Amino acid sequence: MLSYRHAFHAGNHADVLKHMVLVHLLRYLTQKEKPLWFVDTHAGAAAYALDEGDAAKNAEYQSGIARLWAREDLPQALAEYVGQVRALNPDGVLRRYPGSPQIAMQILRKQDRLRMFELHSTESRLLQQYFRDDAPRAMVQAGDGFAGLQAVLPPPSRRALVLIDPPYEDKGDYRQVLKALRDAQKRFSAGVYAIWYPQVQRRESRQFPQQLKELQVKDWLHVALTVKKPDASGFGLHGSGMFVLNPPWLLPKALDLVMPYLVKVLAQDATADFTLESKRA
């Protein structure tokens, strides 16, 4: 939806899960010298202030990244993720949170490329301004990321990580993601695709993981974190999930260590739990 702005939710429990997985994927895929393309279909803004403006209104980061910030017992995958947030807060005080474009820019190398799409007019202007001096390494297009994905796949290097995380305020986004993935698989089946989705009290959300499994992809991983019981009102986010097509082989092992820890630290009530499942051909 054009009304959605991620700043209100920056650094929350869903961002922790999404960006922890993203950091692992980027670090793994940049081990090879060959250039990597990172495609962000719903990029939002590159970074968010946590101590003022939209993010400070609901302060959702307090139940997300803030709970990890000072801990010294983080599993490795979480420590690497928190390290990327620390890179944006060099004085050691948590004031800013990196969105996926900023995290990617911190990890990607000079030979890699970042292609970002954002439909919201305010966010796309902010994103274009933020990366105005980084072309051609980083390029921003104000427009529909689902349509933009068709234009960039397959990438010249034949190596890509695609992050798809629409707001899902419009239930049609679930169908759009499935359609985009079917098309992307035809164009570039070797790519790594990371799909974020919300856990909300909506039929489309509950059915979505199974629909992703039915895409007939040989290798996939599904991880979800539930932090609380669904609200009696039927509104609100009680968790989120990540579905990865063609995941690195080390990702399941890393998440085996991380997910029980996240349940313990990010739980908002006794119903907190996680799901971790995968398939490899």
Image (cartoon, rainbow, N blue to C red):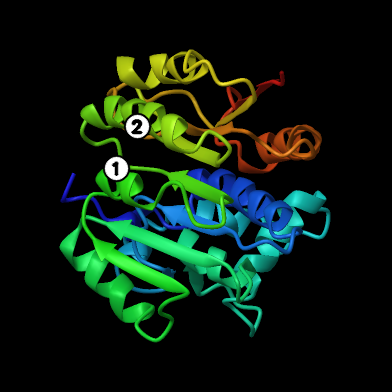
| Residue lying at 81% horizontally and 52% vertically, measured from the top left | 76
Task: For the residues labelled 1 and 2, say whether their Cβ atoms are less than 8 Å apart.
Answer: yes
Residue 255 drawn above or below residue 139: above
- Residue 134 position, x and y percent, is 43, 81
Q: Nearer the viewer, residue 231 or 197?
A: 197
Task: Give amino acid for label 2.
Answer: Val
- Residue 262 position, x and y percent, is 68, 40
Is 188 positioned to the left or the right of 131 in the image?
Answer: right
Kindly tell me whether residue 238 is visible in this rendering.
no
Q: Earlier in the sequence, mark 1 or mark 2?
A: 1
Q: In the rendering, which numbered label is found on residue 146?
A: 1
Secondary structure at badge 1 equals: helix
Dividing the picture into quadrants, the one containing residue 198 is top left
Residue 139 drawn above or below residue 133: above
Task: Give amino acid for label 1.
Answer: Phe
Q: In the rendering, which numbered label is found on residue 177?
A: 2
State the quadrant of the C terminus: top right
Is 216 positioned to the left or the right of 42 in the image?
Answer: right
Q: Nearer the viewer, residue 84 or 69?
A: 84
- Residue 223 position, x and y percent, is 61, 29
Secondary structure at badge 2 equals: helix
Residue 63 drawn above or below residue 267: below
| Residue lying at 55% horizontally and 50% vertically, measured from the top left | 160
Dividing the picture into quadrants, the one containing residue 172 is top left
